[in-house]
Amino acid sequence: MLSYRHSFHVGNHADVLKHTVQSLIIEGLKEKEKPFLYLDTHAGAGRYQLSGEHAERTGEYLEGIARIWQHDDIPELLKPYIGAVRAFNQGKTLRFYPGSPLIARHLLRPDDKLHLTELHSSDFPLLRNEFQKEPRARVERADGYQQLKARLPPPSRRGLILIDPPYELKSDYQAVVSSIHEGYKRFATGVFALWYPVVMRQQIKKMCNEMQATGIRRILQIELAVRPDSDQRGMTASGMLVVNPPWRLEHQMKTLLPWLHEKLVPTGIGHARVSWLVPE
Ligand code: SAM
């Protein structure tokens, strides 16, 4: 049974990192006219109410998106993401947070397509309602990992695949690698963006070793830590592994990540890192 609900964590530092990278990849893909597919394997509910019981209970967004969305000096590179957040929040109060499918919907063009999958019995209907009138989108209650076999390559032969599981099951750390490997065999030019939490550093090292062992080239690693690594419970950092990143992403994130780190972690602890897990 699935117990993870993203509504408890929404808008936290990990969402800020993930959605920043997601928006920059989408903007990068939009530089070419040809339409593309946005495939979100673990899509969540779509829209989250920050004044709702779940988000209020943890208040994680207060140390995440709330610290930056109204900043006077938003870096240009952050504007697509922050623009999406602002589109859901008229006025000065941060009431709603758009999850990855809504950020994509905000940024995609009329001919681009979305394919969204979510398994949770409560989150799936919310996601489906959100996209009821969206002709570009297909929303399915289905296993996200299967989509990397079933939906690739897309007819347009261009695409971003966001893989954002809850890591509730230890097997998720292997499942992400094997499903990216499967997806890559079918669609070697696709952009695959995997999000991961750092709870136990050893687990991430193992996952990264397994990614390297697939033989896939061009994997950019982007990580933002809000605390030093620890063997106590809890997430100290999160990161993204991006296969075939748009050519500007490395430079963009090297510019942006120190700014995000400074704003999200005023004490300066933790780290901000952009490096190639596997180069060209
Ligand atoms: N991507 C979303 C965003 O950024 O707004 C958040 C997704 S949340 C981290 C992970 C979601 O995956 C949860 O809503 C959970 O119900 C769903 N999930 C868990 N296992 C799944 C599976 N095998 N296939 C599809 N969805 C799954």
Image (tube, rainbow, N blue to C red):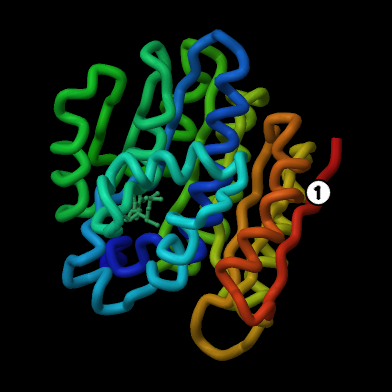
**From where the camera sits, is residue 46 visible?**
no
Tell me which residue sits at (15%, 29%) in the image: 132
Amino acid bearing label 1: Trp
Q: Quadrant of the C terminus?
A: top right
Disc 1 target residue = 276
Residue at 52% across, 76% down: 235
User: Which residue is painted at 68% across and 82% down in the image?
Assistant: 228
Could you say where residue 244 lies in the image, as x and y percent from the top left?
70, 33
- Percent across and percent down for residue 232 are 56, 90
Around disc 1, counting alpha carbons within 10 Å, would you say few (fewer than 14), some (14 to 19), or many (20 or more)?
some
Outermost residue toward the bottom? 232
Relative to 48, does residue 85 appear above or below in the rendering? above
Q: Is residue 143 above or below residue 227?
A: above
Please say whether residue 92 is visible from this viewpoint.
Answer: yes
User: Mark 1 falls on what kind of element?
Assistant: strand
Q: Within 8 Å: ligand 1 and the Cβ of disc 1?
A: no
206 and 55: which is toward the camera: 55
Side of 220 relative to 115 (left or right): right
Q: Residue 122: percent from the left, percent from the top?
A: 15, 55
Q: Quadrant of residue 1?
A: bottom left
Residue drawn at point x = 79 percent, y = 37 percent: 217
